[in-house]
Every structure is written in C-alpha cells, then in structure tokens.
Amino acid sequence: MRFSFARLLLYLLMTIAAVIFLMPVAWMLVMSILPEHEIFQPVPHWIPQEPTLQNFQELFKRAEEAPVMRWFWNSLFVAGTGTLAYLLLSSMAAYAFSRLEFPGRNVLFFIVLSTLIIPGQVTIIPVFLILQKLHWFNTYYALIVPGLAGAFGVFLLRQFFLTIPREMEEAALIDGCGRAGIYWRIILPLSKPALATLAIFSFLGGWNDFMLPLIATNEIEMRTLPVGLTIFLGRYSMQYGLVMATAVLATLPVLVMFLLFQRHIIRGVVLTGLKG
C-alpha cells in the first residue's frame, strides 16, 4: 500500500511539473492564433473565441523583407548536413580513441576533452578572421564547417564504444575484416542509441544557433531562421500575435523532433555510461 501511494504521489508530482513546464509553450500556441483585440483583453483566456491564422498569413505576406521559407530551408539544410558530418567525424575520432593503440592517445584525448571548458564566445573572433581569409561569408561553408569539430561528440561516442565487447572486434579481425570494415559494419550499427542521441543534440544545436549565422552572413537570403526572425521582429515588437507566430514557426519543428525521439535520448545517455 505504501509503495502504491508513493508511486501515485510521484506520478502526481511529475504531472504537475510537466504542466508547469508546458504552460509557456501552450500559451505561445494560443497567442499565435488569437486576433489582436483578444490579446489585449484585461483577463486572458486559454480558449480563443475567434481563432485565426491571420498572424501566420501576415508573416508570409512580407516575403520580400522576411523570406521565411528560405530561412527555414537554410536552417534545415545547415542543421541536417552539419549533423551528418558531425556524426561521421566524431565517430571516427571516438573509434580511434577507444580502439586504436598509439603513442600519446590518452594525453591527446585529455587535450580534446579539455576544450569543453572553453566558452564558445572566446572563439568568435578567430572564427571570424578565418572565415574572412577563406572568403566564406554568406556561404553554407561558413554556417556548417565551424561546428563540425566538437569534443562532446567524441567523448559521448568514445564512452559508448568502450561498452562494446572487444571479442566481436577480434572475431572480425580473425575473419579478415579490416579496421574500416569493423568501424562501419560492427561499431556503428551497434551504436545506434548513442548516435541517435548525439544526432538530436547536434541538430538542436544547429537549428537554434544564433551567434555564428549572425556574424557569418549579412545577406537576407543566407540568414537562418533564428537570426532572420529576430531581426524581422525588431521592427514589429509590439505586434504580439506576429511575435508568437514566428516563435511557433521556429519552435515547432524542434519540439516535434524532441517528442518523437525523446526515448532515444534517454536510452543513449543511460547506455553511454562512464566507463574508461
């Protein structure tokens, strides 16, 4: 009886916490379909009396000053391509650190891991100068390449690779499989939970990135969604319905992706562990 009551209390507390955290998101969705006169009512209400898509229509009508679909495509392309490249490079580095024996491996891994303590703001000026020397401004290279190297992905995948039994790798070597074959045919297929977790983190980071697209682009067609909408909303900050519509547009894809793949995040983090 005590166990059942404790479990019920736990579920109740979790439900209350979930409702509290979801209230801002729900209010954002409600405000995005409210007409202007309902937004400024003295007593706010959660159920719109006259729901409308006018805010979204108004946003897409201003395509010349706010090419929203182009910004959406830029964010999707940059986040998607960057995620695939990030997974490939991080998994290759993690495989080397977890499976290959070479002089200075642990020291080099410690140096890579120590870069996690360096704030991203510190590297803004060096990145800006490098992009300037390479003439990469207003290109997808500037939006994708600087984010391809990251110690977090290497660390996460290395910890997961260490949990894979070495006997499987040794059996493959005996059968004549090379290192590249082991990496591609054994390690990666067995690492789907960790790869899915890292893919979600990488995609969310690329989708929400603001600083790099801000300094790497100055043409309106090359803006990503967070930067473009922020600059656009600076001119219409008092139109709260329009502001909420743009917030929904920027948040909804990320929210849907998280809801669909949240179990992969939990499973990947749990299975990664802290071995080694």
Image: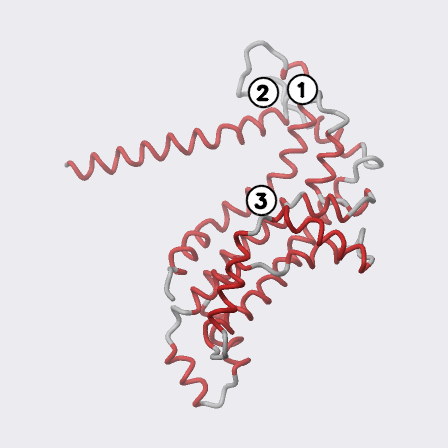
- Residue 173 in percent (x, y) is at 45, 87
Farthest residue to the top: give it. Answer: 42
The residue that mark 1 highlights is 35
Q: Earlier in the sequence, mark 3 or mark 2?
A: 2
- For the residues labelled 2 and 1, the Cα–Cα distance comes to 9 Å
At 77% from the left edge and 26% from the top edge, which residue is drawn? 235
Residue 161 higher or lower than 142, as above or below: below
The x and y percentages for residue 88 are 59, 67
Q: CA distance from mark 3 to mark 2?
A: 25 Å
Q: Which mark is residue 48?
A: 2
Closest to the observer: 79 or 139? 139
**Which residue is depicted at the point 38% across and 56% down?**
270
Residue type highlighted by circle 3: Val
Classify 180 as above or below 62. Answer: below
Circle 2 Cα neighbour tier, 10 Å, few/some/many (<14 / 14–19 / ≥20): some
- Going by the numbered disc 2, the residue's amino acid type is Pro
Residue, far left: 1
Contact (CB < 8 A) between labels 2 and 1?
Answer: yes
Sequence-wise, which precedes: disc 2 or disc 1? Answer: 1
**Upstream in sequence: badge 1 or badge 3:** 1
Q: Amino acid at mark 1?
A: Pro
What residue is shown with label 3? 254
